[in-house]
């Protein structure tokens, strides 16, 4: 129901209603001006033609250098979501299963179902502070498992998987012939250091993007680090689908990489402040939740809540949140994205607290 | 081999080689400045966030108005190629066949194969001026045919299907339960008027784009006009794949629509001149070809030619063309895209003529 809420919120806004949008991981902060100007310059220089389905050479080189891999391991994609769809499509269209610790980002499950893959989720809970039970995930992974998807920091819980657990999961998956797809889009802006899949063999897959760390959500640019053969397959799939990320967008992203540390530090600082505000407000309510390790999300639980009904109700009251059911079997939970300015966060959270049953 | 040639040409350019690129339908003319400025304005206004997977409301409304359909029939897509992939994926991932008159755009076949659909092509030939044999296409369409793809004006022949033939094909396809997907991306800039699928029931599908008519190839924006249920399915697929076309790109395209007639008239005039130049040069050679009804392509035949070898040879000589095998069973043919300035066209055509066996 994540995307239904999103489309409905847009419709209400188009009708002139004011909606405090806590429903999407889409920060209110503007794209840094140097990125905007670099993209504009590139347009004026004619970077408006078809370009390589692998990504612009300079951007691939820079990403390869940052991640200490070869250029051939880098594929630039139309958002990290397209990377995930294309990997699941390539690896599972002839069958197999995907194992994912829950709660999980909506799209993993919707993509798996759309491609016809079996989706196996491992339920985690708030009481154990969202830890992954390694024994249980071991039981879920079998010879038909093609991918184990890790997402640390996690959407929607904002929790990071500890290094030991992360390593154990990779080892188990790889020993059974499954790749780990590690979605690390919140990693650069995390409040705590998160383990990266690049510490392991490139038979695994890093998915990353510019949306969150460079405030480029609507620009649709992400990338993958992967072994060369799978990279080639992804490039071939790009050729017959999205063709390329507009080259001028890639030059904007490349400019962003120059100021990477400053940009991500600013985002992290800003969102840490917001998380503290939200923590203070929510601590005074009956909501249960875990302190986030990263932007942007809180994933509180309210005993007995029907979060789908609650999310629709709240939309009528001018606040958009995502129901917990969008992330697995979490009906009593909902997700708040702190992607609005502090005053709106206070206003929105108050409205939420008032409306709680 | 279309995309291999393209990637190889980019690699050679990256190495500093000069390549006259006749290999892609990617016009040299710059994107009109009003489109560029409108996109830049939209970026500065913050249209850099996630937007609707259906497309920006204003752009959909304008397209609906131009094509005299409802807004719900319009889906904005990450290029017309993504529209075609997503339609084939949605309609054929559980099997079925696609019928296409050949020669045909490479991607139709590659997409069908990637999705696991059966691809049935009807061979046409130069001797009959690329006409579609209606009886033969009737024989190819059966109860498992989900789509018949028409592409008029055609890539690579630049020929338009006459109104009577077009209507007969639609009638046959629809009477057997197959939809016609009409790829009309060259229609607006055609030298002669081409029949549109919108003259028939919306159970059929119009695929169109901004790449060719608005010189926006690298911006990746296209659209589909289709009945509402299939539109909804496409929007849902966008949600879990490309998310949206960057909103600022949509505002650029919207601005382009304001000056639609002027922009397409300019392109048509420019390319008519180029086609006349090419016609004069090629008429003096042993190449056989049909006079184009539209930009951008010539698809000449040279008896006994191995066009794949020829295309690779020509790349070494600094001219990129697409071998006929990229468009079906046309080894003796190759495609020349007149997407370079007139002086380069002359230079490139001379090099081609010199190199002919």
Image (cartoon, coloured by chain):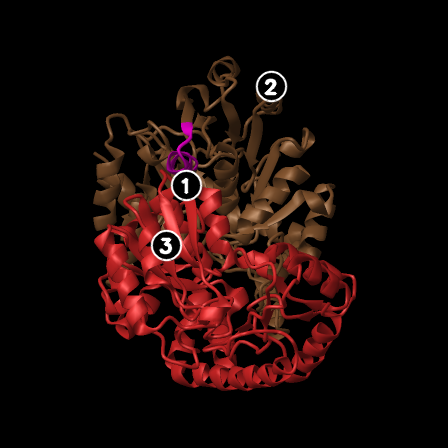
Chain colours: A brown, B red
Q: Is residue A183 visible?
A: yes
Does residue A64 lie above or below B220 as drawn? above
- Residue shown at 33%/41% (left/top)? A322
Residue B160 appears left or right of A250: left
- Tell me if residue A171 is in the magenta stretch: no
Residue B53 appears left or right of B11: left
**SS for callout 2:** helix
Provide the residue span drawn in magenta.
Answer: A108-118
Q: Residues within 10 Å of mark 3 (few under 14, many from 20)?
A: many
Q: Residues within 10 Å of mark 2 (few under 14, many from 20)?
A: some
The residue beneath circle 1 is A278
- Residue shown at 70%/42% (left/top)? A67
- Residue shown at 68%/62% (left/top)? B311
**SS for callout 3:** loop
Does residue A332 lie above or below A261 as drawn? above
Q: Quadrant of the C terminus of chain A?
A: top left
Q: For this rendering, which residue is in front, B150 or A355?
A: B150
């Amino acid at each position: 129901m994540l995307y239904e809420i999103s489309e409905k919120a847009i419709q209400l806004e188009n009708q002139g209603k004011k909606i405090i949008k806590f429903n999407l991981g889409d920060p209110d902060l503007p794209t840094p001006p140097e990125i905007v100007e670099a993209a504009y310059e590139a347009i004026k220089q004619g970077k408006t033609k078809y370009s390589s389905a692998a990504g612009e050479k300079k951007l691939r080189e820079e990403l390869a250098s940052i991640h200490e891999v070869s250029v051939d391991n880098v594929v630039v994609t139309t958002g990290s979501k397209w990377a995930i769809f294309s990997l699941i499509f390539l690896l599972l269209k002839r069958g197999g299963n995907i194992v994912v610790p829950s709660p999980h980002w909506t799209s993993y499950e919707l993509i798996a179902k759309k491609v016809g893959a079996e989706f196996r989720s491992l339920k985690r809970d708030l009481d154990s502070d969202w830890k992954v039970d390694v024994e249980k995930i071991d039981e879920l992974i079998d010879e038909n498992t093609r991918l184990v998807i890790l997402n640390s920091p996690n959407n929607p819980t904002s929790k990071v998987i500890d290094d030991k657990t992360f390593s154990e999961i990779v080892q188990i998956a790889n020993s059974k012939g499954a790749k780990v797809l590690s979605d690390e889009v919140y990693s650069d802006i995390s409040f705590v250091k998160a383990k990266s899949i690049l510490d392991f063999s490139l038979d695994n897959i890093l998915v990353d993007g510019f949306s969150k760390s460079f405030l480029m959500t609507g620009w649709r640019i992400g990338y993958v680090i992967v072994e060369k053969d799978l990279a080639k397959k992804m490039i071939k799939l790009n050729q017959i689908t999205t063709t390329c990320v507009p080259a001028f967008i890639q030059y904007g992203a490349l400019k962003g990489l120059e100021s990477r540390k400053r940009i991500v530090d600013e985002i992290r600082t800003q969102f840490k402040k917001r998380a503290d505000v939200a923590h203070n407000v929510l601590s005074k309510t009956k909501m249960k939740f875990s302190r986030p390790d990263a932007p942007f999300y809180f994933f509180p639980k309210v005993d007995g809540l029907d979060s789908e009904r609650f999310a629709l109700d709240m939309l009528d009251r001018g606040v958009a949140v995502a129901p917990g059911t969008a992330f697995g079997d979490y009906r009593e939970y909902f997700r708040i994205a702190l992607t609005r300015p502090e005053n709106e966060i206070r206003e929105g959270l108050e409205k939420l607290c008032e409306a709680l049953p």
